[in-house]
Image: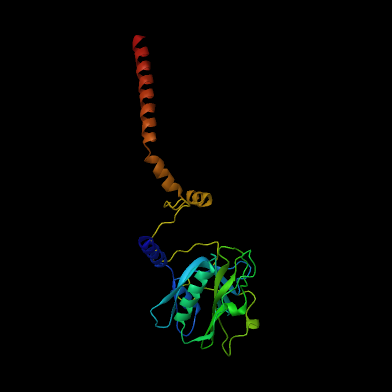
Amino acid sequence: MKTILVILVLCRVLCAADAPVLRFDDQVTWKQIFDSGFRPKHLEGLERNTCVCRDQEFLLQFKDRESKFRLGKGSIDFGFFYDDFLQMFWHQGADPITLEEGRRRADEFRKLFDGFIIQEITMPRLIDASGLVDAGNDENNVKVRVGEYLIWYGFDNSLRKDKPIIPHFYITWNFPGRPDVRLKDSGDVVRPPEGYEWYSLDPKVSTPDPASTAEPLAPSGVAVPEQKTLVQSMNETKAVKPEKAKAAMDESPLRWWLIGILGTVIAIVLVRRLKSKSSL
């Protein structure tokens, strides 16, 4: 049993090794999100004020404290007031958990923000024997305040009897003198932060980090070479100069074979004519 637990812990550590680490000190900026390793995309139809990360897990670190809090795979929404002025960071978990696991995670979260908690959590209670729990209420959240930032960690209802709750995590803030969203140009969309201009927020476009030298992968996971479109091939063919095309034909082995055959035929005809004249 101990061996199994050790394996599970090691798997958890290894799986989380590549997860982004969001270090929360006194603020959260759009550039910090990218520096931490997140790669969001525009939410279709809401390109002006929302970007998302799907199926994303990450680790949360508070100030210089060594411990980190793990948030499992889920959807992260980044809400904006104006340009890259972040207003909200919202992680909605994807995997339901048991009430016992919820209590453990809530305790772990409380330890991470010890000294900054403004509301203790009241764990969801069972409503009936079907497994439905009273989740999603305000008291089902641990609340933390750090300066102008309000941080929530709590649970929603999964409607499952065996694992009745789903965790969520919010960071919201409200700074005095924030930009007026009504002044924002209606044609503006959220753009990558400074230093990440190479990255496309378009969900239909894949832009690997410049440091990555890996070839694109096919769905099977096998590297595939870059393929040219039919239009590109046609344009390249049109771009070949006549002189180069002629030179290519002149160097063709087939041309010399034809010349040799033609010379042989001419020689045979001449020999026959000479023989016919000599016989006369």
Q: Say how the picture is coloured.
A: rainbow
User: Residue 257 location in percent, x, y?
Assistant: 37, 31
The residue at the far bottom in this view is 176
> Can the viewer see residue 199 in this picture?
no
Q: Nearer the viewer, residue 267 or 254?
A: 254
Which quadrant holds residue 47?
bottom right
User: Residue 49 location in percent, x, y?
Assistant: 60, 75
Q: Is 250 on the left or on the right of 231, as rendered? A: left
Is 248 located above or below residue 32 in the figure? above
Is 277 located above or below residue 61 in the figure? above
User: Residue 182 location in percent, x, y?
Assistant: 65, 82
Q: Is 146 on the left or on the right of 156, as rendered? A: left
The residue at the far front in this view is 129
Placement of the N terminus among the 4 image quadrants: bottom left
> Can the viewer see residue 257 in this picture?
yes
User: Residue 51 location in percent, x, y?
Assistant: 56, 71
Q: Nearer the viewer, residue 196 or 60?
A: 60
Is 57 located above or below residue 255 in the figure? below
Q: Nearer the viewer, residue 54 or 41?
A: 54
Placement of the C terminus among the 4 image quadrants: top left
Q: Nearer the viewer, residue 7 or 210?
A: 7
Q: How many marks?
A: 0
